[in-house]
Image (cartoon, helix red, strand yellow):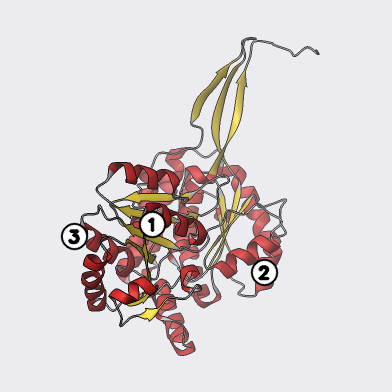
Amino acid sequence: MNVRKLAEEAKAASRVLAKTPTSVKNKALRAMAAALRRSSRKVLAANARELAAVRESGRPPAFIERMTLSPNRVEAIAAALEQVARLPDPVGTTRKFARRPNGLVIDRMRVPLGVVAIIYESRPGVTADAAGLALKSGNAAILRGGKETVRTNAAIADALRAGLRKAGLPPGSVGFVNDPDRAAVRELLTLDSLIDLVIPRGGPDLTVAVRRESMIPVLAHDKGLVHVYVDDKADLAMAERIALNAKAERPGVCNAMETLLVHEKIAARFLPRMAAIYAENGVELRGDAKTRRILPGIKAATEKDWDTEYLALILSVKIVKDLDEALGHIARHGSGLAEAIVTKDAARAAKFLREADAGAVYHNASTRFTDGGEFGLGAEMGISTQKLHARGPVALEGLTCEKFVVRGRGQVRHAG
């Protein structure tokens, strides 16, 4: 595959998309959704072949779950494209900035980034989500999924390009790297004259490799070391619901909880009941010394456990003396994705929401809501755990930047 040619086509397409009216972009998104539905059998057949090969290779259940498609999941992916079509278009929106003493009127306008390359691993739904968000925000997308799902992703990308053609937009708006060789990614990361942003979406190894090799700015989606802190002022029935949902509803995703922090004053009441609930749901617990005195049958948590994203039905548990100790643990071990507190104390909640360092912070709600769709953003490009340009779920606005628009009446600047 000629990666440079793919990037050149994307660059040319980005110039078209930057001036494409919202109505045409929405028409294209609906056409892409319809084409994906028509291609559902082809997509599912490719996915079934790849699933069979991955199962034989001994991959963990969480990995297999992430790459698995079903008719309902394909429909959900198509529906997400239609939802993006219904979202407000950020491109061209303007906010007032300043009126200078010399009469200049300065505004700030949202504009597309240009070409966005998305490098992701096992989740084939990213192919459509990323393409749809890029298109609506006026950007061309270059997609490179994991080698295990290359046929599934190729089938989805083919359908998306068919929808683009029907809407009269250049197929180069959605480029797909079908070469599983890592050399193709390395070449992609050198094309800084053609690509404006790279988004790695996957495990920490992928993120580190892309950051190390890229000549292009990187928007990182790091691992999800997510915590829920149950305060001594918590409604314990509520805490049970949140702690179960955050861990067990879908453990193989980045916004699932990996460490449960419990205030020492309520630990003896809360943990035995919570442990029984977790046992019913197949969750393995690993605890610090204080936790194991209350739950003697569980494994001991090591220092490594506090920094491990399990993506499985495994949970670390730590008893803390107060909110400050909980915040200190989060500061040392959190990845900046999402953190939650369960408490009825408004002052403590406010302190947690202010001081917990993450893209999304929660009071009395599950961290599983950390998702572009759940936030009303439509599909998401990923969840940024860094602080420059965009943070948290990245959707349409995160794929644009601002430029200054200055209006005058013939003013010129004088030296001095």
Q: Nearer the viewer, residue 170 or 265?
A: 265
Does the residue at mark 3 contact the one at mark 1 (Cβ under 8 Å)? no
Residue at image mark 2: 184
Kind of residue at badge 1 = Ala
Farthest residue to the left: give it. 237
- The structure residue drawn at horizontal position 41% and vertical position 52%, both measured from the top left corner, is 324
Helix, strand or loop at label 1? It is helix
Q: Position of residue 228 (x, y in %)?
A: 35, 59
**How far is the residue under mark 2 from the one under mark 1?**
28 Å
Within-10-Å neighbours for mark 3: few <14, some 14–19, many 20+: few
Q: Nearer the viewer, mark 2 or mark 3?
A: 3
Q: Nearer the viewer, residue 317 or 269?
A: 269
Q: Position of residue 11 (x, y in %)?
A: 65, 50
Q: Position of residue 114 (x, y in %)?
A: 61, 46
Kind of residue at badge 3 = Ala
Q: Is residue 298 left or right of residue 338?
A: left
Query: Can residue 253 be seen at all in this image of the molecule?
Result: yes
Q: Is residue 143 left or right of residue 352?
A: right
Label 3 or label 1, whichever comes before in sequence order: 1
Query: Can residue 41 be seen at all in this image of the molecule?
Result: no
- The structure residue drawn at horizontal position 61% and vertical position 50%, both measured from the top left corner, is 115
Q: Nearer the viewer, mark 3 or mark 1?
A: 3
**How far is the residue under mark 2 from the one under mark 3?**
51 Å
Does the residue at mark 2 contact the one at mark 1 (Cβ under 8 Å)? no
Residue at image mark 3: 237
Within-10-Å neighbours for mark 2: few <14, some 14–19, many 20+: some
